């Protein structure tokens, strides 16, 4: 099960990841936070691909 990780130094808080995977990504204080580490059912790879600054990675 992949675990999403956000590099907060890169994140610009655009909200794309939270609109794609709202269970996993929450925007707080202008940055994306991983609220639920295990991506189940949603496609966090879509968020990885959509992030404009490549701030999201998936760890096994
Ligand atoms: S898509 Fe990337 S830059 Fe945008 S809020 Fe998510 S992690 Fe941050």
Image (spheres, rainbow, N blue to C red):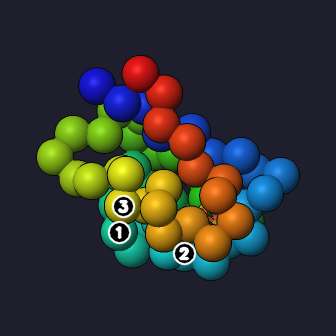
Q: Which residue is mark 1?
A: 20
| Residue labelled 2 has its Cβ within 8 Å of some atom of ligand 1 | yes
Mark 2, secondary structure of its residue: loop
Q: Which residue is mark 3?
A: 46
Q: Where's residue 41, x and y in %?
A: 16, 46
Res. 31 visible in picture: no
Mark 1, secondary structure of its residue: helix
> 10 Å neighbourhood of mark 3: few (<14), some, or many (≥20)?
few
CA distance for labels 3 and 1? 7 Å
Q: Where's residue 45, x and y in %?
A: 37, 52
Q: Where's residue 3, x and y in %?
A: 43, 31
Q: Where's residue 23, x and y in %?
A: 32, 54
Res. 20 visible in picture: yes
Q: Earlier in the sequence, mark 3 or mark 2?
A: 2
**Contact, mark 3 vs mark 1 (Cβ under 8 Å):** yes
Does residue 55 appear to the left or right of 41 in the view shown?
right
Mark 3, secondary structure of its residue: helix
Looking at the rendered image, the disc whose residue lies closer to the viewer, 3 or 2, is 3
Figure quadrant, ligand 1: bottom right
In the rendering, which numbered label is found on residue 15? Answer: 2
Give above or below for 58 relative to 56: above
Q: Residue furthest right?
A: 9
CA distance for labels 2 and 1? 9 Å
Give above or below for 35 relative to 47: above
Looking at the rendered image, the disc whose residue lies closer to the viewer, 3 or 1, is 3
Q: Quadrant of the C terminus?
A: top left
């Amino acid at each position: 099960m992949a675990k999403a990780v956000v590099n907060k130094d890169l994140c610009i808080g655009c909200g794309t990841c939270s609109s794609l995977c709202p269970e996993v990504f929450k925007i707080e204080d202008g940055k994306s936070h991983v609220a639920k580490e295990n991506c189940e059912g949603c496609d966090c790879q879509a968020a990885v691909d959509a992030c404009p600054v490549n701030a999201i990675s998936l760890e096994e």
